[in-house]
Image (cartoon, rainbow, N blue to C red):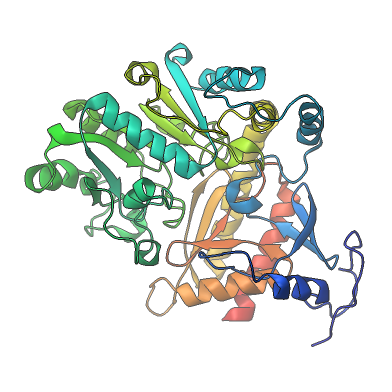
Amino acid sequence: MTTSVIVPPDTNVDDEEDVAVPGPNAQALVARDTHVMVPMGRVYPLAIARGEGCRVWDVDGHSYLDMNAGIAVLAAGHCHPRLVQVVQDQVTRFTHMAGTDFYNEPMVRLAEKLVSTMPDSSHWQVFFCNSGTEAIEASIKLARHATGRQNVIAFYGAFHGRSYGSLSLTASKPYQRQGFFPMLPGSFHTHYPNCHHCPINLHYPECGIACLDAIERTLFHTVCPPGEVAAIVVEPIQGEGGYVVPPDGALRKLRQICDRHGILLILDEVQSGVGRTGNMWAFEHEGIVPDIVASAKGLGGGLPLGAMIAREQWTQSWKPGSHGNTYGGNGLTCAVAHEVLCLVEEELMANAASVGNHLLAALHAMQQRTPHISAVRGRGLMVGAELCDPLTGQPDRHLANMVMEEAFRQKLLVLTCGASTIRFCPPLTITKAEVDEGLAIFESAIRACV
């Protein structure tokens, strides 16, 4: 293997022959990384120096096409000029004054903008925090407080965070919980409607989404009385569980179950919201109205920001001191988030729908000529390609990890999720030409690994 020459970080060396990644500067940085706790573990040795749009450059000057966007965070891409301008303007005014104790205009303006995106927008309120995990924690607290009930139902395959309340609802990988028991009392799980791997071996639509019937027929009649259930928490598209899109009617069925029993419906839109699926919120595809929405990731445009958006009839039960957050409503992050939402409404949401359809069609075509792709699913620019053993049809986790690492070596940034799915969650600014470039590398990576 040829060793890369050390070059300034702003230099693009991709035209050189036999360029090896990671280069010497990245290797040196990795070697220095001995004091940062990383209990999650690194996936591959990308050492970023700068980014622009859908491109990033590492500390050796190598250029990569970014189709993971910091795990669906950079909705407007790297260093969008409008966001950079907002940061520069706001940081010269003020950055922080605790929003739970005082007032600031960026926080109020962002709250106005967020509730304007909800159905019947005059009857919602927002609680600001710093992450999706915190938004879920706030949602659990509000649901319990507002209903006077304790139990919460989530789904197998779900990911809602890693703090104790959110971790108690998370059920995507066993190591996420290992060593941390006991979980939050009153947490229950049931099957997510995953038609590619049906939990009860039926076929949609003839099944009538029978997997969700287990909530009323099994949970409510055995271990979880409906009158003690505060909320059902669900991702409208499962993220870490494998980019699983439920069948049409699933969210409506959950809404009906909740309505029958006085249960709140909490939608975790941390990964699927803010324009990623081609609508502002993924729940809009089914035309339902949730009680609470948890948002983060793309909302902050790269800055740490989360939000719980809840129907006013439930938030009125909270009294002063019921909940709080020092950094929630931070002036800088709220100013940026407002600009993100403007960009999403003006252009990025439509681009996600259009380019997302192109991405899905191209992956479906690739599936026809690639037996190691067993399923392609998604909405907008939240798309997954599940890899399998073609002899058995079973998910192939080892292959997915190899393909992810080989894609990195070929200058494409993707991540895995679920058992063996490669996820595509690029900036919503991505073009069809960039999608074609990325998929050519992806297919090359598969060929190199099988």
Which residue is located at x 51 percent, y 20 percent? Answer: 115
- Toward the viewer: 30 or 71? 30
| Count of picture labels | 0
Question: Looking at the image, is 356 positioned above or below residue 150?
Answer: below
Q: Quadrant of residue 48?
A: bottom right
Question: Looking at the image, is 67 positioned above or below residue 268?
Answer: below
Which residue is located at x 35 percent, y 21 percent? Answer: 318
Question: Looking at the image, is 223 positioned above or below residue 111?
Answer: below
Q: Quadrant of the C terminus?
A: bottom right
**Residue 319: image x %, image y %?**
36, 19
Q: Quadrant of residue 345?
A: top right
Q: Quadrant of the N terminus?
A: bottom right
- Toward the viewer: 198 or 22? 22
- Residue 245 shows up from this direction: yes
- Toward the viewer: 20 or 450? 20
Q: Is residue 251 left or right of residue 49?
A: left
**Residue 11: image x %, image y %?**
92, 62
Q: Is residue 11 left or right of residue 329?
A: right
- Residue 22 shows up from this direction: no
